[in-house]
Image: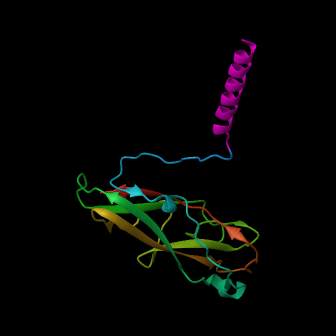
Amino acid sequence: MKTKFKTALLTIGLFAGSISAAHAADGTVTFLGSVHSGACSIKPESIDQTVNLGAIAKHQLQAGGKSEARSVKIELEGCDLTDLTDNTVTTTFTAAPSNDVPGAIGTVGGAGRIGIMMTHGGKPVELGVATTPQAISTGDNTLEFGAYVQGAATGDIVPGDFSAVTNFTLAYQ
């Protein structure tokens, strides 16, 4: 009887050990997202993106000079235009404004007397104001903008690293 009892305990012990090994954790996966009532979904890589504006020579920004424009894209997917009247979307960018460059997004970091300018269709984007409507179609769409660094009109540009953040909101018509 003792042998059967020891065998049963050993079996239970081995079984319990295998259960804990099956539930071992080596890491985690976090899922993020949101649900909204817009006509299109926004691709994950467009929600939180980084645009590298490059290492810009100080002399290029002196006296209101600007860097080369870089592309900023917001990619939409699964657009359903059933409830829209104009089949368009506007984009509103908001950010802390630059103290040195009127109309520009303010920067933080060591660089100084600069700002980030955004464009849509070759024209400057006004912070807090909806862009010109862009036509969209059923399915996938890409909204295209530009961004460049602009120096202050007066004073000396301060070299250093910088970063800036802007938020965007889409409004479907």
Question: Which quadrant does the C terminus fall into?
Answer: bottom left
Q: What quarter of the picture does the N terminus occupy? A: top right
**In-front residue for pair 146/26:** 26
State which region is magenta.
1-25
State the image coordinates of residue 33 (x, y, percent, origin top left): 49, 48
Residue 157 figure quarter? bottom right
Total numbered badges shown on the rendered structure:
0
In this picture, residue 140 sits left or right of residue 148:
left
* Residue 165 coordinates in the image, percent (x, y): 60, 62
Q: Tell me what residue is drawn at x 46 percent, y 72 percent.
A: 145
Q: Please state the horizontal and vertical placement of residue 90, each as a whole percent of the image.
A: 38, 62
| Residue found at the very far bottom of the displayed protein | 59
| Magenta-span inclusion, residue 121 | no
Judging depth in this view, the residue of 9 and 34 nearest the camera is 9
**Residue at the limit of the structure toward the top, as seen here:** 1
Of residues 35 and 61, the one nearer the viewer is 35
In this rendering, the answer to whether 99 lies above or below 67 is above
Look at the image and tell me whether residue 130 can be seen.
no
The residue drawn where x is 55% and y is 59% is 48
User: Based on the displayed image, in which of its 4 quarters is residue 63 positioned?
Assistant: bottom right
Magenta stretch, main secondary structure class: helix
Q: Is residue 7 magenta?
A: yes
